[in-house]
Each structure stands twice: as C-alpha cells, then as structure tokens.
Image (tube, rainbow, N blue to C red):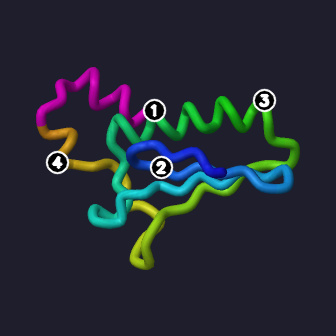
Amino acid sequence: MPLEFKYILYKKSEGVATITINRPEVLNAFNTDVVSKIIQALEDVKVTIKWGFVLNGAGEKAFSAGADIKAMKGMNTGLGEKLCSA
C-alpha cells in the first residue's frame, strides 16, 4: 500500500520507489511541505529500496513549475534560501 503525504504520493514496488509531487493545481510547485516530505521519502528510500527511485509530477502539464512563489512571498531571505537549497 502506498504511503500518502499531503503533497506527495510515495509507493514502493519490486525494489523501486516512486515519489510523485501531487500539486497539479499549481503545476507541482515546490513549497516547504513538498520539500520536507520528499526528503522524508528519500530517507526511507535510502534504507528500504534496492534499485532506485523515480521522481515525477502529477497531472499532464508539467513535472514541476519550480518554487511556489506565492508560498515564498511571506518568507525572509534566510527561509527562502533554505527552501531553495534543500
């Protein structure tokens, strides 16, 4: 059974993990929640997956638009840099 987080879907099958950014309404833009959940899933990949992983985006329009500018609007420089360097 796949693990589901707020903004990503995470499933494992036959030694390969699939991490899907699940925010198609904003072209799978990255925000702090997306980044932290991807990191959490990758920590699991590191210890449980034999072959590798696939990172993709939900929907048909884009893998990801990049950083969620609306979410960054209220951030200070340090927090914005932390999001972009995660």
Per the image, label 2 sits on a secondary structure element best described as strand
Label 3: which residue? 47
Dot placed on the residue nearer the N-terminal end, 3 or 4: 3
Front: mark 2 or 4: 2
Residue 53 image offset from top left, x and y in percent: 72, 51
Disc 3 to disc 4: CB gap under 8 Å: no
Dot placed on the residue nearer the N-terminal end, 1 or 4: 1
Magenta-drawn segment: 74-86
Q: In this rendering, would 17 be left or right of 36?
A: right
Label 1: which residue? 36
* Amino acid on which disc 3 is placed: Val
Label 2: which residue? 8
Residue 3 image offset from top left, x and y in percent: 58, 45
Per the image, label 3 sits on a secondary structure element best described as helix
Q: Magenta residues: mostly which secondary structure?
A: helix
Separation of marks 1 and 4 at Cα, in angstroms: 18 Å
* Amino acid on which disc 1 is placed: Ser
Is the residue 77 above or below the residue 51 in the image?
above
Q: In this rendering, would 53 be left or right of 86?
A: right
- At 42% from the left and 61% from the top, the residue drawn is 64
* Amino acid on which disc 4 is placed: Lys
- At 52% from the left and 52% from the top, the residue drawn is 9
Residue sitting at the far left: 74
Q: Hey, which quadrant is residue 35 in on the image?
A: top left
- Crowding at dot 1, Cα within 10 Å, few <14 / some 14-19 / many 20+, comes out as some
Disc 2 to disc 4: CB gap under 8 Å: no
Label 4: which residue? 70
